[in-house]
Amino acid sequence: MDPKSPQPWRNRLHEIIYEADTPKGKVFDVVLLFFILLSVVLVALESVPSINSSYKDFFHWAEWCITILFSVEYLLRIIAVKKPWRYITSFYGIIDLLSTLPKYVAIFFTGTQSLIALRALRLLRVFRILKLTRYIGESNTLVRALVASRAKILVFMFGVLILCIIFGTIMYLIESDASGFTSIPRSIYWCIVTLTTVGYGDIAPTTNLGQFIAAIIMILGYGIIAVPTGIVTAEFADQNRNLDTNTQACPECMNDQHKDEAVFCHACGARLNHE
Amino acid sequence: MDPKSPQPWRNRLHEIIYEADTPKGKVFDVVLLFFILLSVVLVALESVPSINSSYKDFFHWAEWCITILFSVEYLLRIIAVKKPWRYITSFYGIIDLLSTLPKYVAIFFTGTQSLIALRALRLLRVFRILKLTRYIGESNTLVRALVASRAKILVFMFGVLILCIIFGTIMYLIESDASGFTSIPRSIYWCIVTLTTVGYGDIAPTTNLGQFIAAIIMILGYGIIAVPTGIVTAEFADQNRNLDTNTQACPECMNDQHKDEAVFCHACGARLNHE
Amino acid sequence: MDPKSPQPWRNRLHEIIYEADTPKGKVFDVVLLFFILLSVVLVALESVPSINSSYKDFFHWAEWCITILFSVEYLLRIIAVKKPWRYITSFYGIIDLLSTLPKYVAIFFTGTQSLIALRALRLLRVFRILKLTRYIGESNTLVRALVASRAKILVFMFGVLILCIIFGTIMYLIESDASGFTSIPRSIYWCIVTLTTVGYGDIAPTTNLGQFIAAIIMILGYGIIAVPTGIVTAEFADQNRNLDTNTQACPECMNDQHKDEAVFCHACGARLNHE
Amino acid sequence: MDPKSPQPWRNRLHEIIYEADTPKGKVFDVVLLFFILLSVVLVALESVPSINSSYKDFFHWAEWCITILFSVEYLLRIIAVKKPWRYITSFYGIIDLLSTLPKYVAIFFTGTQSLIALRALRLLRVFRILKLTRYIGESNTLVRALVASRAKILVFMFGVLILCIIFGTIMYLIESDASGFTSIPRSIYWCIVTLTTVGYGDIAPTTNLGQFIAAIIMILGYGIIAVPTGIVTAEFADQNRNLDTNTQACPECMNDQHKDEAVFCHACGARLNHE
């Protein structure tokens, strides 16, 4: 923050809106989160026919208030940042625009009104505000474990998809006369529903052979759920183990993997160098 | 237990009702548990129309017996404890009241009768009585592992909820014409049903795009079930590993929790006594 | 096997029927398993109306053949064993009787015929025959891990049941007007269906509050499936780890946890005593 | 690749088609994968009645193009390889034939057309092409963990099947009057649907006893999903732990796989060189 900057108010604005470390920034983020939650709850309640018919006017005004508030916030964000285009074309920038624009467009064109529900995407900002809280360490561990096992999980999901396409196609050949399996994409959809053990029952095999293959798919799905679980668990176990021991080696015997609170080497009794 | 207490019978009552270490306290807890189970079974059976119509009188008397029994127990609990209000306003105190009051109120007002089913909440007392048994160690391990991973699980459930709100809103926009997705809250409900792989099938997407997004939600739900599993498993594995550290204390500094292979104390460098 | 036993044929019979280590015993067990499987397949096929109507005579004769065969086996088992009552009153003895008796009784009384399907219980004998195969080690590991975590799993299942009773009762109060929740036992059944993420959809909440609580139960069920998984996994991991390192300590530095193939201590270089 | 081979073009063809290490081989594999994906998408879209009726001609020609392309590839594969019969009778050889033949046969006989959907099986070739990518390490870990736990998983699935047969038979006896449980095989199918927590709801118990046993099956299924998970997770954890052993070889005996903290070689007792 250069005090000789020509626009100190802009710097302060940037501090409040984009930074979460200063007290004012924290307050701004919490207030923003409150209004995002409020807007999501309002949109959700408005979609319930019985509630909407009773409080039509209230929803009308409340939504305009929030739309204007979010519009102001959007404009302030553009003003405060040095490279506005970077913000506007960023993921959050597009979401922020989408959460206000449909309301204005709906004045001229009907039908775009319902797109305002996309405001729910603003909830993703919560993950940024989460950084404020004491849960930051926990969520970091979660994210790190997921990132570390990302490649394995992608290979697994890819394999599951191939399996679903193959089994879905086979089921289409077997069950094509039955009511549910009207096309291969729908058969693949059914196969995903079955393999993931969701099992709606809107499409279900009725022939003997179809039920036999469905049983195989189910047992397969029941068994291979172990794979992502195994991947992530092994990653978590790794991270827990690494947290317990530090990487510093004993100056005498080179033994590492001492406990964090260790003062002396547990193998040769020499004093450890502590930072 | 001061023998010179002005009310020794009250102390003895407290010992019987609130403590589970003395023989009499154990007997009281087991008898109480029996009557709680009996009352839950009675309420459950009474709710079955065919059984209720045949044994209406029996249920009537049995319920009054149990209600009076529980009322006496409630009064004794108030008498026995030194700070009655603390018990009355405690969680168990409110449940205890709720399990007797509706019966009395039902004499004057109809309709409150069914609230007697809240008696089932008294079953939570089982967890206290569990402490009596040889399973205490096991349940402690369970509870400790869950407590240790509480923060991680909360962050995870919070993320799942955000996901469900966002996907539920999107599905409402896509599927609003179909029968099931009548409002955003209902769409979010469907999303939870799908993501947790429950899959009732009372609400199910019918459009192609809806089924495509549903398939993504399912595979997501199938994959991220690995996260809580990984969290809890790593915690259990940790607790099992802590069993690997031996309980022997250092002869110099009394520090325990050395690794099994440790030769020297990791806190003061003294040689450990090995068996 | 005393050669001077008064009934050497009885000893040999016992060897063939009850022991699985001798060649003849192995042959007997495999032949028996084949006939058990055959009988189960026959009973299953007979229950299919379309197949039964076409091959009624074949099933009639095949079933009598197998019944007589199993009866002969049952009598031989009684003769061969020294304490017949112990066998007759044992779990397998009762199952063996139940798999033949209904057929004879059905000559005089109709209606008992279908009980012959209990023959499927004889499949449990497979687990004994499994001991013959190279899978014995694997199934032992499985069984050992399950036995070691038995107490924890029991506590967990007990907790799940209590949860289901409480939530089932609450849902009965909320949803009693809806079609599915006709009694508390049925509500508890629904709660188990939901918590275990099975989700038939034959009973499903329709009120807003009911769906809200159902969502909580689902997320709970989705989360606490981690608990048995964590228990069993930690047990498996323990057993795998123990297999890798032997418990023998180094004669010089007392370090244990050497790898199985280790010849020298990895901490001080002394030669290990190998058995 | 012997340069003096009488048919150098055949060697080069073999290099392009069967090997994935050379630049040309890589290009061929990627192009082939593209056409396999295209053919699967075409077959899937063609099965959708509304799309098929609009673009009937396009699908007709596109399919003939791909069929001819695949036929040429099939012939080239036969020419390029030294032992053609070995390829023709191999798993991939039969799939490759099945993905072209039905189209030709359909000229003379109607009805075989739909078998062209078996082309989806060619997607299995993806797993071979996966070797090209940076994911090879990840998929190897996955495969190795699954192979290592294969025997345990087989024993488990075998046990699950026995359980399903027994419970299915029992449910047939209890629920035979209800609509869904019309035969034992169908009851076993229902039992698999329930135990794997899929739960379609097309067959669901309606009697009290049936629902009680169904509840037991569900809790069982909810609990024993822990077993495959535990097996695979322990295997993954093992493989991650093996990464803890460093790759440095002993200067004396070349033995690697020492523990990270090892100071002396555990095979010959020589001091290890530490970085």
Image (cartoon, coloured by chain):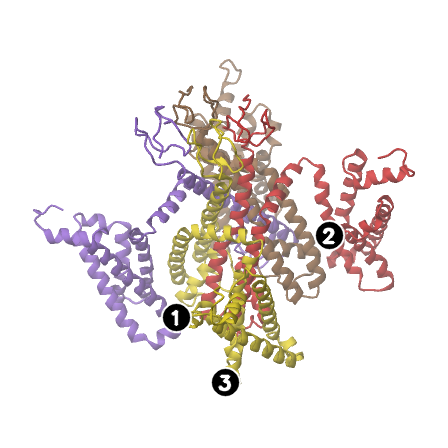
Chain colours: A yellow, B red, C brown, D purple
Residue pictured at 30% horizontal, 72% vertical: D59
Q: Which residue is mark 3?
A: A109
The x, y position of residue D230, in whole percent, is 49, 43
The amino acid type of the residue labelled 1 equals Val
Is C186 above or below relative to C107? Answer: below
The x, y position of residue A243, in whole percent, is 50, 42
Label 2 SS: helix
The x, y position of residue B236, in whole percent, is 55, 41
Asked whether disc 3 touches disc 2, contact meaning CB atoms under 8 Å apart, the reply is: no
- Report how many numbered discs are placed on residues in the image: 3
Which residue is situated farthest in the right direction here? B6
The x, y position of residue A42, in whole percent, is 61, 73
Label 1 SS: loop
Depth check: give the residue in front, D72 or D243: D243
Using the image, name the chain to which the residue with label 1 belongs. D
Q: Which residue is mark 1?
A: D48
Residue pictured at 46% horizontal, 62% vertical: B216
Structural distance between the alpha carbons of marks 1 and 3: 34 Å
Using the image, name the chain to which the residue with label 3 belongs. A
Q: Dot 2: few (<14), some (14–19), or many (≥20) neighbours within 10 Å? A: many
- Give the number of the disc on residue D90: none
Q: Are marks 2 and 1 on the same chain?
A: no
Label 3 SS: loop
The amino acid type of the residue labelled 3 equals Phe
Which residue is situated farthest in the front direction here? A4
Res D103 seen here = yes
Q: Which residue is mark 2?
A: B121
The image quarter containing residue A162 is bottom left
Q: Dot 1: few (<14), some (14–19), or many (≥20) neighbours within 10 Å? A: some
Is A196 above or below relative to B129? Answer: below
Q: Are marks 1 and 3 on the same chain?
A: no
Residue D175 placement, left or right of D134:
right
